[in-house]
């Protein structure tokens, strides 16, 4: 057991029969009344975000979470297969658990998975990926304006908006958290 004095971002707790990760918190000491802690909690299983307030000194049930780096291998049907790079143990997760993160899974990338015992709670993808454009409208010489965009499909199947000068076969850097195009990757040589 811990108290509200032990709260920090990223701490995993059990509350109301659910597992939550503390996304943000604030200690508040009003001029009148007792101090309290306002927390923003992310449900570890569903990803839903809620806010809760606890009186200062209240006890919290901390959950031990272990993180592993798993390499994405392939998918077949609804299942996506990952491998622990240290033990070579393989794990499979369904598309329901992964949600919209499946659109960024590229063979060989390393993801961080948090476990509570044997149960996988969350998966974190690399923040940035370099992906090849497989489908888009052709670019024209002189289309260098970067504030306008056109739709493009990348090798993982995700659809993003890219500047007009991007073409099929170009390698682009994408932010997996927002799905935004960041820049075009220059090829060596």
Image (cartoon, grey):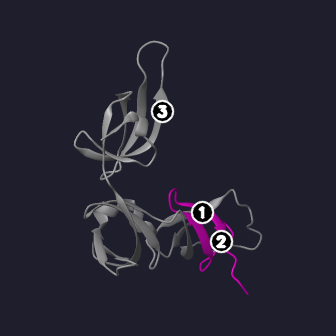
Please name the residue shown 41% across and 14% down the image.
33
**Disc 1 element:** strand
Distance from label 2 to label 3 (Cα)? Answer: 44 Å
Residue nearer the viewer, 62 or 93: 62
Distance from label 1 to label 3 (Cα)? Answer: 33 Å
Please state the horizontal and vertical placement of residue 186, each as a whole percent of the image.
Answer: 70, 77
- Quadrant where the N terminus sits is top left
Residue assigned mark 2? 166
Q: In the current view of this chain or complex, which residue is farthest to the front?
A: 1
Residue 121: image quadrant is: bottom left
Determine whether label 2 and label 1 are within 8 Å by CB.
yes
Please name the residue shown 53% across and 62% down the image.
127
Please state the horizontal and vertical placement of residue 122, each as a whole percent of the image.
Answer: 36, 58
- Looking at marks 2 and 1 on the same chain, the residue that comes earlier in the sequence is marked by 2
Residue 2 higher or lower than 47, as above or below? above
In this picture, which residue range is highlighted in magenta?
A: 162-189
Residue nearer the viewer, 118 or 47: 118
Q: Nearer the viewer, mark 2 or mark 3?
A: 3
Please name the residue shown 32% across and 54% down the image.
64
Asked if one can make out residue 79 in the rendered structure from this viewpoint, the answer is: no
Residue assigned mark 3? 26
Q: In the current view of this chain or complex, which residue is farthest to the top?
A: 32
**Disc 3 element:** strand
Please state the horizontal and vertical placement of residue 97, each as a whole percent of the image.
Answer: 30, 61
Residue assigned mark 1? 181
- Left or right side of 182 for 112: left
- Left or right side of 5 for 89: left
Please state the horizontal and vertical placement of residue 129, each as a whole percent of the image.
Answer: 55, 69
Query: Is residue 177 one of those drawn in magenta?
Result: yes
């Amino acid at each position: 057991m811990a108290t509200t004095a032990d709260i920090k971002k990223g701490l995993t707790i059990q509350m109301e029969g659910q597992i939550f990760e503390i996304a943000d918190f604030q200690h508040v000491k009003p001029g009148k009344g007792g101090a309290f802690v306002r927390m923003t909690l992310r449900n570890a299983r569903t990803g839903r975000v809620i806010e809760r307030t606890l009186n200062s000194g209240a006890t919290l049930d901390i959950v031990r979470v272990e993180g592993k780096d798993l390499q994405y291998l392939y998918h077949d049907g609804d299942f996506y297969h990952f491998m622990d790079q240290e033990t070579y143990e393989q794990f499979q997760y369904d598309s329901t658990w992964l949600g919209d993160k499946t659109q960024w899974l590229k063979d060989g990338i390393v993801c961080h998975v948090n476990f509570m015992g044997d149960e996988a709670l969350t998966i974190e993808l690399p923040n940035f990926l370099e992906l090849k454009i497989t489908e888009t409208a052709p670019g024209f010489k002189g289309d260098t304006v970067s504030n306008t965009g056109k739709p493009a499909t990348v090798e993982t199947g995700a659809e993003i908006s890219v500047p007009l000068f991007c073409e099929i076969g170009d390698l682009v850097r994408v932010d997996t958290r927002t799905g935004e195009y960041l820049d075009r990757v220059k090829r060596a040589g």
